[in-house]
Image (spheres, helix red, strand yellow):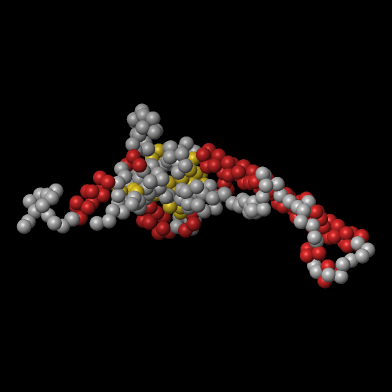
Amino acid sequence: MTRHARNSTAGAVYTYHEKKKDAQASGYGTNAKRLGKDSVKDFDCCSLSLQPCRNPVISKDGYLFDKEVIYQYIITKKNEYSRKLKQYEKSKKKEEEDCIKKQMEETEKKVSLFVKKEDNIVTSPLNSFKSEEEASTSISNMAEGRDKLLPSFWIPSKTPSAENTKKEKPDSTIYCPVSGKPLKSKDLIDVKFTLVKDNEKKSLITKENRYMCAVTHDILNNSVPCAVLRPTGDVVTMECVEKIIKKDWIHPLTNQKLKEKDIIVMQRGGTGYAQTNENLEGKEARPAIQA
């Protein structure tokens, strides 16, 4: 018997559509959603603040930042490293002091055992064949220098099971907040966008078409792959790079010789939910429903 409706309950088989619908309604299964334009940052926005750059700079990996924002990030990371370094040096100094204190306690214990042994003029023949620990007959917690070794049970740091965790030396390298690769302020290159020539008296942020290619004057947007020329910082399209610049490897504006490393491809990254033209679908992993 054929089914006459998609939601008919007369069928004996639990179909894929019914399973998918029930999973979506019950909160089970992976939830996927196509992200729109609002979830993707513009190509001329800072990768940290997600706002249009006033003084744009680009890293060697192709990520665009506002100079003020990325410098503030670098300074914050340097201050954090200095704080962690001070804590590391303080803990290392304390560890050395504890080691010296432990050695002094062991030496003091050996001296006290030696003095006690020498004070006994008559020794028992049975105890002469036993070790120093076995020769001790006192069961007091305060005998034979154990008063200094006995931990205070009401202090958490003094309990026998509490051990100071050894801190590792902090890493002084500053990493890019997007790519995770080492980042230095001297590697940041100033970017020069070419404004679109029009007679509209509008604010730059409100304009839909703000910048154009420095060579071909093509309008730049998220759908157009772009690159930055390292010597001057001009932004050009990848089509211009492939068809014009790579023919003779000469800068079209300054006639300067270029190399492969002088062309930095701009990463058209999105927000934390998506990457432009790479993954525009957000997924949320949820428990799977069993059929």
The C terminus lies in quadrant = bottom left
Q: Residue furthest top?
A: 201
Residue 6 vs residue 237, the one in the foreground = 6
Left or right placement of residue 169 versus residue 6 in this view: right
Q: Residue furthest left?
A: 1
Q: Position of residue 23 (x, y in %)?
A: 26, 49
Number of numbered markers: 0
**In this view of the protein, can residue 216 be seen by the observer?**
no
Q: Position of residue 207 (x, y in %)?
A: 35, 34
Residue 114 vs residue 97, the one in the foreground = 114
Residue at x-position 40% and y-position 59%: 247
Q: Please, is residue 144 above or below residue 197 in the view?
A: below
Q: Please, is residue 221 above or below residue 138 in the view?
A: above
Q: Position of residue 72 (x, y in %)?
A: 55, 39
Q: Where is residue 146 in the image (x, y as percent from the top left)?
A: 77, 53
Left or right placement of residue 6 versus residue 184 in this view: left
Left or right placement of residue 5 versus residue 177 in this view: left
**In this view of the protein, can residue 203 be seen by the observer?**
yes
The N terminus lies in quadrant = bottom left
Residue at x-position 82% and y-position 57%: 109
Residue at x-position 46% and y-position 50%: 62
Q: Residue furthest right?
A: 121
Residue at x-position 39% and y-position 30%: 203
